[in-house]
Amino acid sequence: MRTPTRSILALAGLLFTFLLTSQHALAIKSMNCPKEPATGTPIASGDVYSGSNCELYTADDVDSFVFNANKGDTWRIILAWLGSYPGTCMALYDPNGNNVYPTTCTGDGELIASQTLAVTGQYSIVLTMEGDSSDALYALSLERTNPFPPDAQSISVNQAIAGTTSPPASQPTYTFYGVTTGTYKVSASWTGGEAGICEYLYYPGSATAQPAPDQGCSGDGTYSFTFTPPSNATYMVLLDSQGDATGSYSFEVSCYLGTCTPPPPVCVLKDAPTYNATTGTLTMDFTLATPVAATWDAWLINHNTSTQLWSQSEPITDKPVNLTKTETKVPKEGVLGILSTLTVPTTTTTTGGITCSSWVYVNTGKP
């Protein structure tokens, strides 16, 4: 749906504000469960449900959560048991009602499930009580690991990050750009609380984390490993607590050996628009690449007014891809401009703003 038009001067002011205004990084979203009946509750990547309402009250009680996913995506679910013995059970169903992860129970610990999905649509996470417990409190989190999730925080090399694994089942994720000329040290230390912190390295396009030693847990100390990237690309590290504990940690990706400085970020945004006067259809053939998750905005400029065509999240896309957008019912209004931008947030370690933009004209003919 189009937004109301506004003056081109106002648009210019808005874009200038994007460049200068600090924006917050995407982060874990913690929520209490809805009150009973807690069925069909929406959950997305980066969400954690934990609170007084996250409880199964009877042996017949059912809590369910739903999320949308694409075919080939890989998702990681953590169910943390927080109540009395024996625990909580989980099953996963695809959009057709097929059981793709059989009912499995936590016992007195936590359950971690990583699933590559075969169907596009809405999936259901169904939670039930294990046995007949008098207190079945739980925490539930969801994280997409392939493609890398939009909630991952982009960090720079040699910048220490402090964080917490509260609430239980949290899965903080960090992305960084690695080059083949450097060897990197990935280190996580448990700085407060019980148990420890675990870290997992993901290569781009991989459905699973790299095997040990490129994953492991700290206990009450530090776990670190070194690796040399096989290609110049964006990599991800996912953290979670060892067991269902909560506490604080420090995390850093540092340059261990060689040259770790990446080349200038590859940000590409090009457009080749065409217009069909018979159907009034504007077709925009974009070439796009972004080394960090960004917001993709586009406007149609007609003389001194602008109409926003879309604003959407764009995941990390290291290599340029071709994307086509269409806008119907565009009347003949002469020469129109198309402005599009990729905007990234400002974090404690990176400067945000518009990373690249595209400005092209298309002739729709005389009105």
Image (cartoon, rainbow, N blue to C red):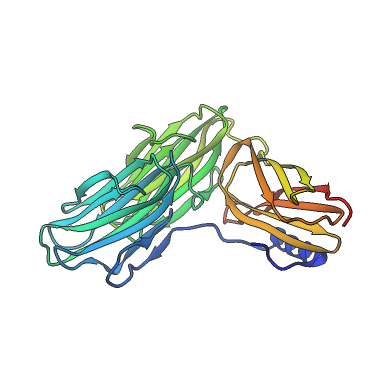
- The x and y percentages for residue 336 are 83, 53
Residue at the right extreme of this rendering: 366
Residue at point 45%, 55% (across, down): 162
Residue at point 57%, 27% (across, down): 181
Residue 319 quadrant: top right
Q: Is residue 26 left or right of residue 262?
A: left
Residue 225 quadrant: top left
State whether residue 192 appears in this view. no
Residue at the front extreme of this rendering: 278
Residue at point 34%, 41% (across, down): 115
Residue situated in front as seen by the camera: 321 or 273 = 273
State whether residue 360 appears in this view. yes
- The x and y percentages for residue 109 are 20, 52
Residue at the left extreme of this rendering: 132
Residue at point 68%, 48% (across, down): 326
- The x and y percentages for residue 216 are 33, 39
Count of numbered labels shown in the rendering: 0
Q: Is residue 276 left or right of residue 109?
A: right
Residue situated in front as seen by the camera: 352 or 224 = 352
Residue situated in front as seen by the camera: 129 or 354 = 129
Q: Does 170 sit above or below residue 304?
A: above
If the image is split into quadrants, where does the N terminus sit? bottom right
- The x and y percentages for residue 27 are 48, 58
If the image is split into quadrants, where does the C terminus sit? bottom right
